[in-house]
Image (cartoon, rainbow, N blue to C red):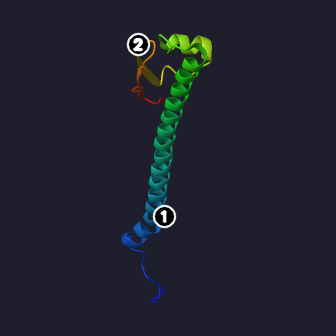
Amino acid sequence: MNRFQQKSSFFSYFKKINLPLFGFIILLLLFLYGVSSVSTTTRSKQLESLERAVNRSIVQCYAIEGIYPPDMEYLIAHYGLFYDQETYFIDYQPIASNLFPDVTILLRNFEESD
């Protein structure tokens, strides 16, 4: 019997196993937070880009034809506007042929399937 050998207690075993596990969990949570943050930023940039594209197409139509487009389908068919209709909703309300239309672009509620 070796009197200098210490018995391994449950606490030391717990420390050996769980400290790396907790470190891994913390790193995993930080990674998931970063991915979520990037995803949110990307969505907002896509929304800004779509707003600019719609406004540019409306102004281009007015510059070429002298009237604002009657509806969104007209912009899609004649000016090559393309967007993801499952992700974004565009409410296009023409006021008059010589007044800039009221355009509202909204992000639809969607659930990501993993």
Reading the chain from its start, which is encountered first: label 2 or label 1?
Answer: 1
- Residue 77 appears left or right of 40: right
Identify the residue at horizontal 50%, vertical 52% (top origin): 31
Q: Which residue is mark 2?
A: 96
Kindly state the secondary structure of the residue where label 1 is placed.
helix
**Whether label 2 touches label 1, CB < 8 Å:** no
Residue 84: % across, % down: 53, 23
Kindly state the secondary structure of the residue where label 2 is placed.
loop
Residue 102: % across, % down: 39, 21
Residue 39: % across, % down: 49, 41
Tell me where residue 108 sits by quadrant.
top left
User: Can I make out residue 107 in this image?
Assistant: no
Identify the residue at horizontal 52%, vertical 21% (top origin): 58
Q: Which residue is mark 1?
A: 20
- Foreground residue, 66 or 95? 66
Placement of 55 over or under 71, stated as above or below = below
